[in-house]
Amino acid sequence: MHPGKRSLLLTLACCLAAGCVSAPPVAVPNPITVRARSFEQVWNTTVQVLDEYFDIAKEDRVTGRIETKPQVAATLLEPWRRDSLDWHDRLEATLQSERRRAIATVREVAPGQYAVTIEVYKELEDLPVPVRSPTGHALFRSEPTLHREYAVVTGEPVSSNWVNLGRDWKLEAQILADLSMRLGHTPPPSP
């Protein structure tokens, strides 16, 4: 067997043995309704759980909205990251550029009851030509010789083309299940 194939198979075996592949998430309604002593308890727990998956970009307690920064999806070689739940998602993220971002809303629906909604959006990068592709570069150059990307002073990423793939319901369910467990609430199963 070719040494490159052997090392690839060994890497995949290690990822599988390390728990890279997880069980399907438990079906959880979105939004979930939880009982808590205060809005602060639900808010802080939601921020803590989201922070385990993404970096928080904005928190607005007045509107009850938490937004995360877009994050490149976890690949097969990153088993410690939690945003790609199963082997298929990790393989897909390894072979193409994907990212996810989350939006959570927390609102009081009755005294002592709070509704928490999690929305995770998945995006695919659409490039006109492959980046840093060595194939055919010498013969068919499609970009100028000097390629520079300037960082915007505001800290926003350099603009690129991301195509919305819709919501990632599996990751939403996993985050909501983690949140329910932390708040001591067992949601009824979804139909």
Image (cartoon, rainbow, N blue to C red):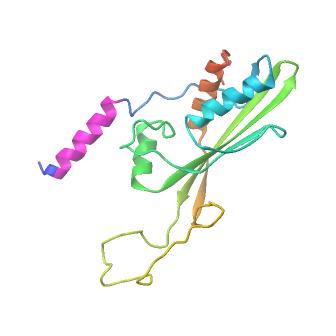
Q: Is residue 31 or residue 152 the one in the foreground?
A: 152
Is 164 included in the stretch rendered in magenta? no
- Name the residue located 88 percent from the left edge and 19 percent from the top edge: 111
Main SS of residues in magenta: helix
Q: Quadrant of residue 37?
A: top right
Relative to 76, residue 138 above or below: below
15 drawn magenta: yes
Taking the image as shown, residue 139 lies to the left or right of residue 145, namely: left
Q: Is residue 186 left or right of residue 38?
A: left
Whole-percent x and y of residue 96? 44, 56
Q: Is residue 22 above or below residue 138?
A: above
Residue appearing at x 26%, y 41% in the figure: 11
Image: 163 above or below 104: below
Classify residue 88 as left or right of residue 48: left
Residue 167 image offset from top left, x and y in percent:
63, 45
Position of the C terminus by quadrant: top right
At horizontal 68% and vertical 30% (from top left) the residue drawn is: 46
Q: Is residue 32 visible?
A: no
| Residue found farthest to the front | 153
Point 47% across, 56% down: residue: 97
Q: Is residue 10 visible?
A: yes
Question: For residue 107, which quarter of the picture?
Answer: top right
Q: Position of residue 12 (x, y in %)?
A: 29, 40
Residue furthest out toward the right: 111
Q: Which residues are magenta?
A: 4-18
Is residue 173 shown above or below 60?
Answer: above
